[in-house]
Image: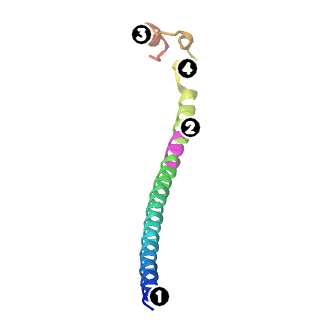
């Protein structure tokens, strides 16, 4: 009788110990999942922000390309032979400008 009472106590203590360990393990897993979720949310926000920035830069690039094309049509320097010279001289540059 005494031995079975001791065994019962041991079983109860072991079950309690296992219950506490399982609870700790679940808490740890939940914390890991929460941390990963926060990281994911942060990365999603950063991704959205970067996509927005890429969109703005793409629009700016299109605009500047159009401005450059329009400018190339009217720029006298682009029609001047000095464009083929690697180091432009100030007098060559002046000779290409309209007076």
| CB contact under 8 Å: marks 1 and 2 | no
Front one among 34 and 25? 25
Q: What residue did someone put label 2 on?
A: 66
Residue 12 lies in quadrant: bottom left
The dominant secondary structure in magenta is helix
| CB contact under 8 Å: marks 2 and 4 | no
Q: What residue did someone put label 1 on?
A: 4
Q: Compared with residue 55, is residue 35 higher up or lower down, i.e. above or below?
A: below
Of marks 1 and 2, the one in the foreground: 1
Of marks 3 and 1, the one in the foreground: 1
Who's the residue at 52% across and 24% down the image? 75
Mark sitting earlier along the chain (1/2): 1
Q: What residue did someone put label 4 on?
A: 78
Number of marks in the rendered image: 4
Mark sitting earlier along the chain (2/4): 2
Front one among 10 and 38? 10
Q: Which residues are magenta?
A: 55-61
């Amino acid at each position: 009788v005494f031995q079975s009472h001791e065994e019962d106590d041991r079983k109860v203590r072991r079950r309690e110990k296992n219950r506490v360990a399982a609870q700790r393990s679940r808490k740890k897993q939940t914390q890991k999942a929460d941390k990963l979720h926060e990281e994911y949310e942060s990365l999603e926000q950063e991704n959205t922000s970067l996509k927005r920035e890429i969109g703005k830069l793409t629009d700016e690039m299109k605009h500047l390309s159009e401005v450059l094309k329009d400018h190339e049509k009217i720029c006298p320097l682009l029609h001047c032979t000095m464009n083929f010279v690697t180091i432009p001289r100030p007098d060559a540059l002046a000779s290409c400008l309209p007076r």
